[in-house]
Image: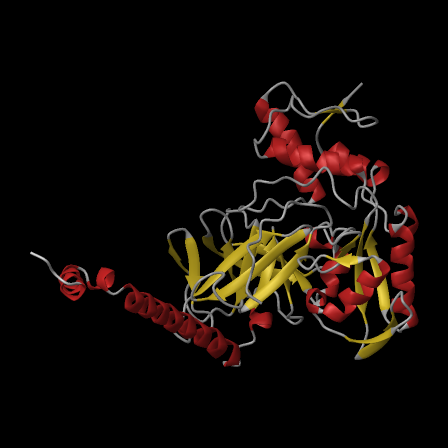
Amino acid sequence: MPTKSGTFWVNWADTHAKNSNSVEDLVEPFRSAAKNFIKALKDAGATVEVSTTKRSARRAYLFHWSWKISQGMCKAADPPKLENVDIQWDHGTELESRKGALEMVNGFGLAVPPQSINPPSLTSHHITGKAIDLTIKWIGIIHVKERTGTTVAVPFMSNVNSNSGLHGVGDSYGVKKLITDAPHWSIDGH
Amino acid sequence: MVTDGAESRDSAARKNPFCATPLISIIMLCATMMAACDSRNRAVQSKLDSGHDFNVHIGWLHGNCLAIKAPDLEGRTKLSVVSLGKPQVALEAEIIQRTESGAECHALLQERKDVNNSEGNVFYKVVPASKSPLGLAIGIIGLKGVLRTTDGAVHADLNGDGHEDYFTECSTSEGVQFNVWADAPYKNKALWSAYYYLGYDTEPNCLEMKK
């Protein structure tokens, strides 16, 4: 028996549709690339915190459709079924369906940027296990070994998006920086 | 009557000097644009050199929670808020207290807190003066001037140097980019920027910004 959209699904997702911060949940060859990059950074004296690796497709499904229904961007009958997520989006009236979806948007803390017409994505490199979010810190300059064995000096920059030296090291391992989002690295920089 | 080219050009020039001398008009246009651009660059540099620390006066909000690089704000401190909807709206709010709770602050939810804390922010629970929701917003502590609205855009002279400053937000792949600009958005380097990590994937819509 399906359960109507609403706060229940926020709690459900925190138990049954959690994201991972384990490097082991990434897929090969990106998993080995990320491990080697992190090891090189740690060996050089940097601290590396992993925020997210593989994101849950079920969680993304709940984010995406609750956002769209709550903003009136689709009908409650529109979302396709997803296996093992027995949610009833349609409460019978549009008002009640939007109310249930909005409870989820608020419960998940989803942002509704006024300039954006785009809901949270259903697909991404995180969902396929090909991206990792990292916070990398050190003091001064570290000497990091690239995959080729060459050691390069990399100064710390508070804006990691500007640190091309660090991006180059990641690139040598097959871990590429997306320069709009501070923590984000992936198999192709997207 | 047969006229030579010079006569023809002179005649056209009397009617429209810009048509008759395209090269000169292009040069004049370029010079005007460069002068305007140079003026804006000077405005940005002047603001950055003014000694006004934008980081301790400006923060961002998601709902009733302010993230700012100012660790010692006291309760009841007044906050001027630019709610970044369409149109933008100028609001007032007040700081309640510092918080580290994801229940009070979306930016501190489990999936977000490590990255948002690492940006050097501290977080404050705030209360708006009116019932209007704050949404995604930029907050200003100790605003010297007043927030004005023109054509749906809120602006203010943040450091009292005679130049108006503008406020924007846009989506990146995993977050929200907030910016404050001198004179006009996206024309020069931002006066102040901040990144809010959402911890989920979104469609980016940020314009390319000048470095």
Q: Is residue B105 visible?
A: no
The location of residue B37, given as percent across then percent down, is 42, 70
Q: Which quadrant of the view contains residue B194?
A: bottom right
Instruction: Looking at the picture, tell me which residue is in the foreground, B43 or B37.
Output: B37
**B166 left or right, relative to A30:** left
Q: Residue furthest left?
A: B1
Instruction: Looking at the picture, tell me which residue is in the foreground, B119 or B38.
Output: B38
The location of residue A121, given as percent across then percent down, is 69, 40
**B83 left or right, relative to B6:** right
Instruction: Looking at the picture, tell me which residue is in the foreground, B11 or A172.
Output: B11
Residue drawn at 58 percent across, 67 percent down: B211
Residue drawn at 92 percent across, 64 percent down: A39
The location of residue B14, given as percent across then percent down, is 13, 63
Q: Residue furthest front?
A: B2
Residue drawn at 72 percent across, 24 percent down: A80
Q: How many marks?
A: 0
Q: Which quadrant of the view contains residue A174?
A: bottom right
Taking A62 as reference, is B132 above or below it? below
Q: Locate the N terminus of chain A and report the quarter of the image it occupies.
A: top right
- How is this picture coloured? secondary structure
The location of residue B126, given as percent across then percent down, is 60, 57
Q: Is residue A136 visible?
A: yes
Q: Which quadrant of the view contains residue B149?
A: bottom left
